[in-house]
Image: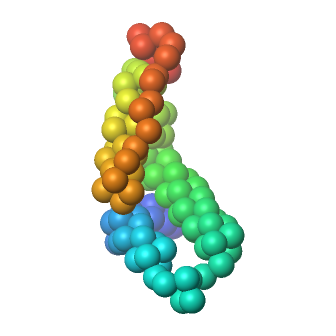
Amino acid sequence: AEQAFTELLQSLMAKSQNHVFPFARGLAEVQALPESLMLDGEYLQVFVERFLMQRLSRRILAQFHIALHRPQPRWVGNFNLETAPAALLREAVADVRAMCLALHGAAPDVRVEGDARLRFA
C-alpha cells in the first residue's frame, strides 16, 4: 500500500509540474483587462496567494515522501546534507528574477549575505 501511494504521488507530481507559468500568464491577462471587467484586486491577491501556498505546501510534502522512499547516502528525504544554502538561494533568486522580468519587465536586485561556505551538515 505504501509503495502504491508513493507511485500515485509520483504520477500526480509529473502531471502537475508545469502549471505555475500558465497560471502566471493567465493572471497577467486578467490584470490587463479593462477595469470594468477586472476582479476586485484584494480578492484576486488573496486567491493567488492561497492557490500558490496550497500548491507549494502539497508539492513539498509529496516530494519529501517520495524522496524518503528512495534512500541515498548523505540525504534525508529531499535534503542533501552537503547543500550550500547560499548557492541554493542564488539559484532561486535567479529564477525569480527571470520570472519577474518576463512578467513585469523589471526585477529587484538581491544581495545574499552570510557565510557562503555553510552546509546543512
At a point 47% along the width and 44% down the height, the residue shown is 68
Depth order, front residue of 11/29: 29
Tell me the quarter of the picture where residue 78 sits.
Answer: top left
Instruction: Name the outermost residue toward the bottom.
Output: 37
At a point 34% along the width and 53% down the height, the residue shown is 105
Tell me the quarter of the picture where residue 116 sits.
Answer: top left
Question: Picture coordinates of residue 46 (x, y %)?
Answer: 67, 67
Question: Picture coordinates of residue 61 (x, y %)?
Answer: 55, 53
Q: Is residue 79 above or below residue 86?
A: below
Question: Picture coordinates of residue 41 (x, y %)?
Answer: 63, 72
Instruction: Name the outermost residue toward the front.
Output: 35
Question: Picture coordinates of residue 75 (x, y %)?
Answer: 42, 31
Depth order, front residue of 19/98: 98
Residue 60 in sight in this render: yes
Q: Is residue 44 above or below residue 81?
A: below
At a point 61% along the width and 62% down the height, the residue shown is 49
Tell me the quarter of the picture where residue 111 sits.
Answer: top left
In the image, taking residue 95 as reference, residue 89 lies left or right, namely: right
In the image, taking residue 54 as reference, residue 7 lies left or right, namely: left
Residue 47 in sight in this render: no
Display colour scheme: rainbow
Q: Is residue 104 above or below residue 110?
A: below
Count all numbered tags in the image, as a single digit.
0
At a point 65% along the width and 78% down the height, the residue shown is 40
Q: Is residue 4 above or below residue 88?
A: below
In the image, taking residue 39 as reference, residue 112 lies left or right, namely: left
